[in-house]
Image (tube, rainbow, N blue to C red):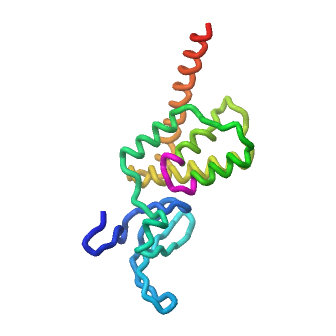
Amino acid sequence: MTNKTGLEFKVGDAVVYPAHGVGKVAAVETQEVAGMSLEVYVVTFDHEKMTLRVPTKKAKTAGLRSLAADDVVSKALTTLKGRARIKRTMWSRRAQEYEAKINSGDLISIAEVVRDLHRADSQPEQSYSERQLYESALDRMAREVAAANRIDKDAAVELLGKSLSAKKAVIAAAEAAEEAEAA
């Protein structure tokens, strides 16, 4: 994906930085740092009102990447329809794992967190920390799906909601099959 200038991204490209989600390359600047000339991507995150400068030579190792491809987005939406896989460990350990998945920047991992922490109306209320992690993962995933599909964030949240509600039908069918086997 490297173009003729040797840069991977150009001004105006939507990119994903693992710890902050979807941003836009606002500029490519050369800055003087400790007496050395350093070329950096200037990435802006409008939703966080933040600007990040990533050295162009370290962009890959820092985790800066292009938006997820269509096949990755569809795989992430399919992941939402799956059955929640909640480990039987202490909440603090699971919360750390969820946080690590969210900050990995990997759309599939974020989808797993959304799937595992999603609560249907019929399920018990979430704790505050569960709700915070769920909303963080949902927001991060919705922003990338919106940018990848060129739709607004609200439409992306609606799309994710449809995938999560499809999960109910899949789970109900699985539970019915389990009951039929037991009978």
Question: Which residue of the protein is positioned furthest toward the bottom in this rendering?
Answer: 35
- In the image, is 95 to the left or to the right of 51? right
Question: Which residue of the protein is positioned furthest toward the top in this rendering?
Answer: 183
Task: State whether the magenta stretch is mostly helix, strand or loop.
Answer: helix
Residue 95 position, x and y percent, is 68, 49
Q: Is residue 159 above or below residue 45?
A: above
Q: Is residue 36 above or below residue 7?
A: below
Question: Which residue of the protein is positioned furthest toward the left in this rendering?
Answer: 4
What residue is drawn where x is 57% and y is 57%? 103
Task: State the extent of the magenta-drawn residues as a range.
Answer: 102-109
Is 107 included in the stretch rendered in magenta? yes
What residue is drawn where x is 54% and y is 56%? 104
- In the image, is 146 to the left or to the right of 181? left
Q: Is residue 79 above or below residue 174?
A: below
- In the image, is 66 to the left or to the right of 80? left
What residue is drawn where x is 67% and y is 29%? 122
